[in-house]
Amino acid sequence: MKKIIFVGALVFSSTFAFTQSKCEDLKDHDKKEEKVKEMRDRMAKELNLTEDQIKKINLIEDKYKSREDELRKKSEELRQQIHQLKEDKKSEINKVFTEEQRQKLKKIKEDMHNKKHLHKQGKKFHS
């Protein structure tokens, strides 16, 4: 019986974590919360969780939520810093080029973009 409860709790936690990560793409916070609540309710029903189990799981979820949110925030800040670093590097490298080289690089990038775009459409690229 203990094994069944352990496996059930593990499945519940894994499903909840998966649902949370899937909902990261949702821009609307209310939709995310609604999806999480639906999944919690579904798992509680399918696993026949008692009210005591549900309360304990909710306390555990609440315990970790703020730490997860903090890490997500740090992660987003790091992504922004990396983006800015790349832009700064690109700008500095661009200053090394002559105007002619910048134009040639721009053309190369456009060609690569067009080639990639045509490839996605299943067409051949000829320059």
Image (cartoon, rainbow, N blue to C red):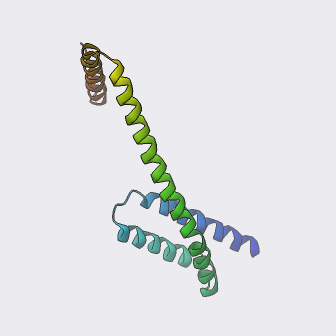
Q: Nearer the viewer, residue 30 or 97?
A: 97
In the rendered image, residue 99, in percent from the top left (x then y), is placed at 25, 17
Query: Which quarter of the rendered picture does the N terminus lie within?
Result: bottom right
Q: Which residue sits at x=69%, y=74%?
A: 5
Count of labels in the image: 0
Q: Which residue sits at x=25%, y=13%?
A: 100
The answer to whether residue 65 is seen in the rendering is yes
In the rendered image, residue 107, in percent from the top left (x then y), is placed at 25, 19
Q: Which residue sits at x=48%, y=63%?
A: 20
The answer to whether residue 48 is seen in the rendering is no
Q: Which residue sits at x=36%, y=69%?
A: 31
Asked which quadrant contains residue 114, the reply is: top left
Residue furthest to the bottom = 51
- The answer to whether 105 is drawn above or below residue 20 in the figure is above
Q: Nearer the viewer, residue 81 or 46?
A: 81
- The answer to whether 103 is drawn above or below residue 37 in the figure is above
Asked which quadrant contains residue 9, the reply is: bottom right
In the rendered image, residue 111, in percent from the top left (x then y), is placed at 26, 20
Q: Nearer the viewer, residue 4 or 80?
A: 80
- The answer to whether 54 is drawn above or below residue 80 in the figure is below
Asked which quadrant contains residue 2, the reply is: bottom right
Query: Which quarter of the rendered picture does the C terminus lie within?
Result: top left
